[in-house]
Amino acid sequence: MLKIGFGYTRLCNFKCEFCYSKSVRGSWTKQDAVRVIADAVEHHGSVEVNWGTGENILAPEFVEVLREVHRLGVPQDLTTNGSIILRRQALQYLDELDVSIDYPDPERHNKARGHLKAFEWATQAAKYAARELGIQVTVTMVGMRGNLNYETGYKMVELARGLDAVALRLNMYFFTRPDRFVPSPAQVGDFLKGLRDAGAGIYGTSDPAVAKFLGVESAGYLGSVRLLPEKRVSPSTYLTSDEWAAPVQLPDFYNNFLKTDVYKRFEEIYKETFPRRSADRVAVLGYDPYYVDGEVESVKLKRASGRSFIHLGYLPTTIFSV
């Protein structure tokens, strides 16, 4: 299975206070995007695509891209801030929908996302996809200093259930330097305790640092790849500098990427730190500010099963049952 995290565009209609790519621009064209996925199908057979990075639904011809990829028989997941509700016809081509909600209440979420309709659109999109179309919905959140606490963990599980979502996905805040959004280890642990007490379980994680708090093994990244809006390929959405991203080469861009110095260096760093630290944070800073050296209090969550997720296995992400 080849999992492609596809950043079709960096266009966005929100002004998230924690955005890591405000100064980066770029978009694919319909023809090139479909061509690269068709190439992956030809060379790898089994392919899944998660659309993310920017708010892809804003890009010209994106609905047509979804339709063409659907015709290829490729399962598709879209991560959205909720704007998908403005173009509902796009939902018919999706197998999964990941809706970004960082706080369980409108006021704090709208402030974090810089848009007065952020919470309204997100909740509408989740409910419509799950209830009207039967699409598997996941609530996805960025884990930061402001929202990683016991109360938010508990309430996010309740929110996801109320939206008929099947899971909660956590992406730890990624940074290019230490700043006010980086959570402390204690906050990570408290958040996980809130999830546990709300009855959440764990499907899996590919974030070694989160895995340490949960007392489980981290798995993932091999067999997944990110295509950036600038038509480059990278091991992770957050690794966008030239030392981590290489130009897409056809045919068989994935195997071409595996041969690059970019990938070899990433693999070396990942193996050196796995499972002790999160590779992308170490790669940028040389350390992981929310990693705790030595023993930590493990937060035991029940193991969840019975569902598959296109996003499970990307670095770094954790998916919880609700």
Image: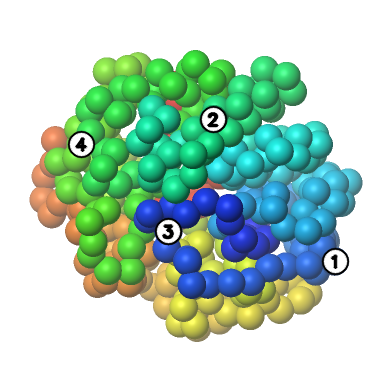
Q: Which residue is mark 3?
A: 19
Residue occupying the far front of the picture:
116
Name the amino acid, label 2. Answer: Glu
Q: Residues within 10 Å of mark 2 (few under 14, many from 20)?
A: some
Q: Nearer the viewer, residue 109 or 309?
A: 109
Q: Earlier in the sequence, mark 3 or mark 1?
A: 3
Q: Which residue is mark 1?
A: 31
Q: Earlier in the sequence, mark 1 or mark 4?
A: 1
Q: Earlier in the sequence, mark 3 or mark 4?
A: 3
30 sits left or right of 101 in the view: right
Q: Which residue is mark 2?
A: 120
Q: Which is closer to the viewer, label 2 or label 4?
A: 2
Q: Residues within 10 Å of mark 4 (few under 14, many from 20)?
A: many
- Residue at 11% across, 44% down: 295
Q: Earlier in the sequence, mark 2 or mark 4?
A: 2
- Residue at 30% across, 29% down: 152
Q: Which is closer to the viewer, label 2 or label 3?
A: 2
Is 157 drawn above or below residue 73 in the view shown?
A: above
Counting from the top left corner in percent of width and height, residue 136 is at 63, 28
Q: Are marks 3 and 1 in contact (CB under 8 Å)?
A: no
Whole-angstrom CA distance, mark 3 to mark 4, is: 24 Å
Name the amino acid, label 1. Answer: Gln
Specify how the rendered protein is coloured. rainbow
Q: Which mark is residue 189?
A: 4
Q: Nearer the viewer, residue 126 or 214?
A: 126
Q: Secondary structure at mark 2?
A: helix
